[in-house]
Image (cartoon, rainbow, N blue to C red):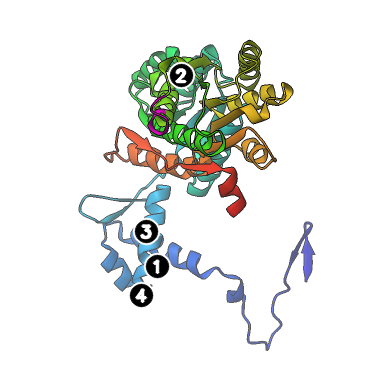
Amino acid sequence: MERLGGEVFPKEPMAGRKTTKRLYLIPVLSKALDILELLQATNQPMTLEAIHRQTRISKTTVYRVLKTFVHRGYLSQGPDGLYRQVLRPKKMRFGFAGQSADMPFSEEVAKSLIDAASSVGVDLMVLDNRYDAETALKNAEEFIRSKVDLVIEFQVEQEVAPMIGDKIAAAKIPLIAIDIPHPHATYFGVDNYRVGIEAGETLAAYATANWDGRVDWVIGLDLVEAGQLVQSRITGAFEGVRSGMPDLPVESFVRIDGRGMQEMSKKLIADFLQRHPKDKHILIAAATDSSALGAVDAVREMKRDRHVAIVGQDCIAEAITEMKKARSPLVGSVSHEASSYGPNLMNLGLSLLRGQMVAPYNYVTHKMITRDSLRQE
């Protein structure tokens, strides 16, 4: 071995040995370059079959190489199916405004998106909305000044969504909105009402199994500023509880705006528990896991663990850790599969930029996680 510039390289083969310098080549890369050079040399659109015949590379390899070059912008494929060289391939640049670096689910989405952008060769400009409307507006303006090819917006303030959507549309930049709809944007996220239904059903099942169906209160820790679509998580949760416990009076259902934040939710639930010291059967559906964890903190400090059952949304790592604790009041969380956001958002963004038809609402898969399901893993 030889050491050059701090790196170790194998020595050149000695004369007389059968190994050659070809040992150091990457076969599939050589084939890919053969295909690209053929298209450059002919300077004419070609079919997959013609490229296969002229290069004598397997058709499967030719197909995969061509699709990769199209995906990365080095080739294009027209409606006629022919492949063409792109003379000046432009690396795409997306802008991503995250909800807040302090919100665990937002950070999980950001990580997934950064990894996905790297894997497909897209530059990603990342800004932090800081859970603040004014910052979100400034970030949208920064994306416009930077002339990104597409914006992915993750911000909670429904109030500024029309302004952000209008600014980006005026700049003729495609927009994808995560979880909170924005005008002029393609929606990507969970089916908010459906995840709420499943949270409510889980709470009703817990009350039936552990409290003989007795319930004093059903509290929805809401996220009012996000608008009606996100609020439908709580609407759905109430319907899910009613489906399992149809005789509960309407007065038992209470909505409280926790803003999706841990400390605020902790304070609000602590206040509620202090006002109802004798009630021992309280169900809480939280719009986010951060709110759910705030409720857990309040319940635990007041030693009301056996009196309260909580279900959250997002299934962040902290929620999973909490659910694993013995006698935790957090009995479940709906996983929004944050790791799937990045690849799906990249595919959606690239489809928009290629002019392909996409659905106005694009829902991610979700699944209910409970203490029992964690034990079975």
Residue 189 lies left or right of residue 221; in this view the side is left
Q: Which residue is mark 1?
A: 61
Q: How far is the residue under mark 3 from the one under mark 2?
A: 43 Å
- Residue bearing mark 3: 66
Q: Earlier in the sequence, mark 3 or mark 1?
A: 1
- Per the model, the C-alpha gap separating discs 3 and 4 is 15 Å
Residue 49 in view: yes
Label 4 with label 2: CB-CB less than 8 Å: no
Which callout, 4 or 2, points at the residue further toward the start of the chain?
A: 4
Q: Does the segment drawn in magenta span residue 316?
A: no
Amino acid under disc 4: Arg
Q: Is residue 57 above or below residue 345?
A: below
Q: Amino acid at mark 1?
A: Thr
Residue drawn at x 58%, y 54% as measured from the top left: 376
Question: How far apart are the alpha carbons under marks 3 and 1?
Answer: 8 Å
| Mark 1 vs mark 2: in front | 2
Q: Position of residue 186 (x, y in %)?
A: 35, 30
- Whole-percent x and y of residue 213? 49, 32
> In terms of sequence position, does the residue under pointer 3 or pointer 4 come before the other?
4
Q: Secondary structure at mark 1?
A: helix
The answer to whether residue 49 is above or below residue 214 is below
Near-viewer residue (87 or 273): 273
Q: Which residue is mark 2?
A: 226
Magenta stretch?
242-247
Q: Give amino acid for label 2.
A: Ala
Location of mark 4 (residue): 56
Question: Residue 246 lies in magenta, yes or no?
Answer: yes
Q: Amino acid at mark 3?
A: Leu
Foreground tag (3 vs 4): 3
- Across and down, in percent, residue 375 comes to 62, 51
Quote the CA–CA distance across marks 4 and 2: 57 Å
